[in-house]
Image: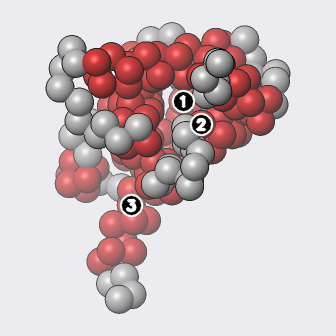
Amino acid sequence: MPASPTDRRISRTQLALQEALLSLTLQMDYEAITVEDLCEHANVGRSTFYEHFRGKDDLKRSGIAAFEAEFVGPPSEGRLFSFSLPLLQHAKAHLKHIRALGTGRGRDVAMAAVTALVRKQIGEELGREEPAPASTDDLEVRFYTGAFMSVLTGWLDSGAHLAAEDVDAVFRRLVVRAPSS
């Protein structure tokens, strides 16, 4: 069924706010950006902002959720960690925005949301969607999540000079090894 006019308006408003956040992070420190700045930049009212988001961190998290819906899906047939390459490519394409988040709360919010996305994807791909805390399944999901996030943050912090495809290949080589005989 086609989207109703209301759905399009909601999408346009949310997109305008996302773009405002991206634009403003290039101009000023994430910590300094206010909801008022976002509303002014997106040309929406404050009450409209709060109809969609609880605050600026919620807006940031929603951008990552939108990424998940667009790029990350069910595991590719026979390919573990199928989220890896699309996520790396997206990160490289948005490196200037990631750098603009700096090392403060903006980056913390973004990295926590990305970590949750990666953890969820790994759990699904390993068939361990919601492992019991401190179980061996939970430890396995945590291990792979930590390994990927370490590779991702190290690559981004060093300037993301390697191609996303090369980083993905290294990550895969390290975590998807054939059993030794």
- Compute the Cα span from label 3 to label 1: 18 Å
Quadrant into which the N terminus falls: bottom left
Q: How many marks?
A: 3
x then y, percent, for residue 141: 38, 25
Quadrant into which the C terminus falls: top right
Label 1 element class: helix
Name the disc covering residue 13, or none: 3
Q: Identify which residue, 46 or 148, lies in the foreground.
A: 148
Residue bearing the label numbered 2: 84
x then y, percent, for residue 96: 68, 29
Residue at 51% x, 10% y is: 103
Name the disc covering residue 25, or none: 1
- Amino acid type assigned to the residue bearing label 3 in the image: Thr
- Amino acid type assigned to the residue bearing label 2 in the image: Ser
Relative to residue 148, is residue 154 depicted above or below?
A: above
Residue at 22% x, 18% y is: 135
**Is residue 115 visible to us here?**
yes
Report the residue that reaches farthest toward the front: 181
